[in-house]
Image (cartoon, grey):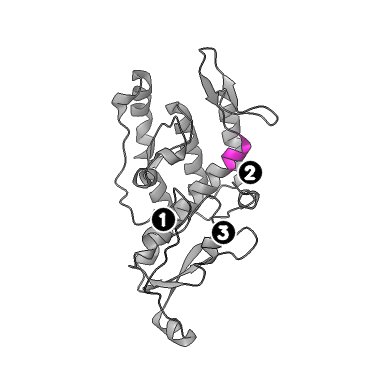
Amino acid sequence: MPEAEQKVKYVILPFKEAIEYFRKKGLKVSEASWKEFKQQVQVRSFTVAHVTQMDILVDIKSAVDKAISSGQSLGEFKKGLRDTLTKKGWYAPKGEKAKIKMPDGTIRKRLTGWRLETIYNTNLQTAYSAGRYKQMMESTREHWQYRAILDSGTRPDHEAQNGKIYHRDHPFWDTWYPPNGFGCRCDVVTLSERQMEKRGLKEEMKGTDLKPDEGWRYNPGRVSLDKWQPDLERYPKELSEQYKREKPIFD
């Protein structure tokens, strides 16, 4: 991931729609990376690459929920979760390798400070954008304008969309509603008919052949958010039972 993307910091104030979006997500235990999941599954489920213990995933999801609902800062989020993960052997202190060999011979990829920051930024930005999408759809303003942050950290394909205006029902938003990649800072604003006329603005009709980053070519606000549930038959009995006990937290 480019260094410029890692320096992105979000200050997101909690609001009802963003909180509701995140809490509708089920849990997905992952042995591989986020790329293994199709976009429809990604938007319905909360997962952390290589986290294979349900209780650890519950801990992380609970921490993200707290950050979104209370407006917790990145520093507060990292400190609280770092302490929890350290106690359970899932955090790699600075200077140590993330991967360690467990007594049973399996390899555990522990989380690092860098990964906690990615988890925080990605989930808060996605929840905010999905909540914002719901608000905009309820507005009478039907003209939406894509805005990119124009600096050295902006991806060329994202910059190419800056300032473009589409009707809110245009297929463009099926793939280009932000965030459109890790660390993406793009957003969308609504415009009234009066603003369009006064500024001499016109809607785009054709769309674009450019695509957002791999794994981000979907609209989290538009995809149905019926709660995804894991197939508990695939997991060891103790993990299935633990999920059943913890599940009410996210209902």
For this orientation, the residue located farthest to the front is: 209
- Identity, as a three-letter code, of the amino acid under mark 3: Arg
145 vs 156: above or below: below
Query: Which residue is label 1 attached to?
Result: 130
Residue drawn at 44 percent across, 82 percent down: 196
Relative placement, left or right, of 149 versus 212 is right
Mark sitting earlier along the chain (1/3): 1
Please tell me in which quadrant of the rendered image residue 235 appears: top left
Query: Which residue is label 3 attached to?
Result: 155
Relative placement, left or right, of 214 versus 205 is right
> In the structure shown, which secondary structural element does the residue marked by tag 3 occupy?
loop
Mark sitting earlier along the chain (1/2): 2
Residue drawn at 62 percent across, 37 percent down: 113
Which mark is drawn over residue 191? none
> x and y percent of residue 223 in the render?
33, 53
The boundaries of the magenta stretch are 112-117
Question: Disc 1 or disc 3, which is closer to the eye?
Answer: 3
Q: Residues within 10 Å of mark 1 (few under 14, many from 20)?
A: many
Q: Residues within 10 Å of mark 3 (few under 14, many from 20)?
A: some
Contact flag, marks 1 and 3 (Cβ < 8 Å): no
- Identity, as a three-letter code, of the amino acid under mark 1: Ala
Q: Magenta region's main secondary structure?
A: helix
Q: Is residue 183 visible?
A: yes
- Identity, as a three-letter code, of the amino acid under mark 2: Gly
Query: Which residue is label 2 attached to?
Result: 75
Q: Which quadrant is the C terminus positioned in? A: top left
